[in-house]
Image (cartoon, helix red, strand yellow):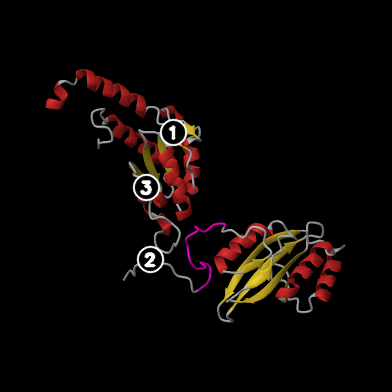
């Protein structure tokens, strides 16, 4: 497929696709329930065979967590960003580790840093944090007694 | 002094043992972060660590010096303590770089960084720097050698 075919297919599948900012890819918001089927379509039909990364953002103003999936295609050199909005309490989304194996570790890190549950993940252990740390460090409202404030210099 | 009066033979043995120990401080490869790169460079050709007899060992059972080169997190602190306890006596610890001395640039806002490896294992020599140059690490090794030179069989583990 040519890059223009891919662009047309993306535009038809995701009507709300936003234009690509410089050095990035077009992004689309999807519903959490449809995420798995959308990613299967992107991998099998449009050739996005590489999950570059999977991470989350804490949209504190909207009170939501946004999970970001960046995909890339080695064949057509096209990229796309898929975003999912989740509530801050009880954030659950289907795991995509059965579609892209690399998502296993990305989802483990995102789960422990933001408190998102990836349903169906084969190995939901902690990846980077010590076992006794409580809380979700990359949320904007996280604080810990170890975090000492830098003293004010007059 | 009374202790030295019996001492010519024992001090000669002390000197010989200390000379042997200080010129063969085999160090455990314990490079965690950027200081580890400088540790590798100190073993490189320009400032050669091994000409002081200090060979790198991968196993703590064969090492008598642990150079803590890099940042220690709480998750890593447990493993660092286990490795330190697996080293046979006499053993020495060198804290290389500001992360190992005091937590370094992470001393204020970090929730997972141990503020200095001295909270985990007893440290003999601190080498400041971020990262210390290879010459600074060699100076730290020579400081450790001075400390070893002053040790005595009659008072093992005492201060030099």
Q: Chain of mark 3?
A: B
Look at the image and tell me whether residue B1 can be seen.
no
Measure the alpha-carbon separation of dots 2 and 3: 22 Å
**Residue A61 x, y percent position in the rendering:** 56, 81
**Residue B15 x, y percent position in the rendering:** 27, 23
Q: SS of the residue at dot 1? A: loop
Between label 1 and label 3, give the one nearer the viewer.
1
Between label 2 and label 1, give the one nearer the viewer.
1
Do tag 1 and tag 3 residues touch (Cβ < 8 Å)? no
**Residue A82 x, y percent position in the rendering:** 71, 70
Residue under numbered circle 1: B63
Q: Nearer the viewer, residue B87 or A30?
A: B87
Measure the alpha-carbon separation of dots 2 and 1: 36 Å
Residue under numbered circle 3: B128
Residues in magenta?
A127-140
Q: SS of the residue at dot 2? A: loop
Label 3 Cα neighbours within 10 Å, binned few <14 / some 14-19 / many ≥20: many
Q: Is residue A125 magenta?
A: no
The answer to whether residue B4 is left or right of residue B78 is: left
Label 2 Cα neighbours within 10 Å, binned few <14 / some 14-19 / many ≥20: few
Between label 2 and label 3, give the one nearer the viewer.
2
């Amino acid at each position: 497929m040519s890059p223009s075919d891919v662009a047309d297919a993306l535009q038809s599948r995701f009507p709300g696709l936003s234009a690509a900012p410089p050095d990035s890819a077009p992004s689309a918001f999807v519903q959490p329930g449809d995420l798995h089927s959308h990613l299967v379509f992107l991998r099998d039909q449009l050739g996005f065979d590489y999950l570059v990364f999977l991470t989350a953002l804490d949209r504190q103003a909207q009170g939501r967590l946004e999970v970001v999936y960046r995909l890339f295609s080695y064949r057509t050199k096209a990229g796309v960003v898929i975003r999912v909005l989740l509530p801050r309490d009880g954030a659950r989304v289907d795991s995509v580790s059965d579609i892209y194996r690399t998502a296993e570790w990305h989802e483990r890190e995102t789960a422990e840093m933001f408190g998102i549950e990836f349903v169906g993940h084969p190995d939901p252990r902690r990846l980077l944090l010590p076992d006794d740390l409580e809380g979700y460090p990359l949320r904007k409202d996280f604080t810990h007694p170890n975090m000492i404030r830098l003293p004010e210099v007059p | 002094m009374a202790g030295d009066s019996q001492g010519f033979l024992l001090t000669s043995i002390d000197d010989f043992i200390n000379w042997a120990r200080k010129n063969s401080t085999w160090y455990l490869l314990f490079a965690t972060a950027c200081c580890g790169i400088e540790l590798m460079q100190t073993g490189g050709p320009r400032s050669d660590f091994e000409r002081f007899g200090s060979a790198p060992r991968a196993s703590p059972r064969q090492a008598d010096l642990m150079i803590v080169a890099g940042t220690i997190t709480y998750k890593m602190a447990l493993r660092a303590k286990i490795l330190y306890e697996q080293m046979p006596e006499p053993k020495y610890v060198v804290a290389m770089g500001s992360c190992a001395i005091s937590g370094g640039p992470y001393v204020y806002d970090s929730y997972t960084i141990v503020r200095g490896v001295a909270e985990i294992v007893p440290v003999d020599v601190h080498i400041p720097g971020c990262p210390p140059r290879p010459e600074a690490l060699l100076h730290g090794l020579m400081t450790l050698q001075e400390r070893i030179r002053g040790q005595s069989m009659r008072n093992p583990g005492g201060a030099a």
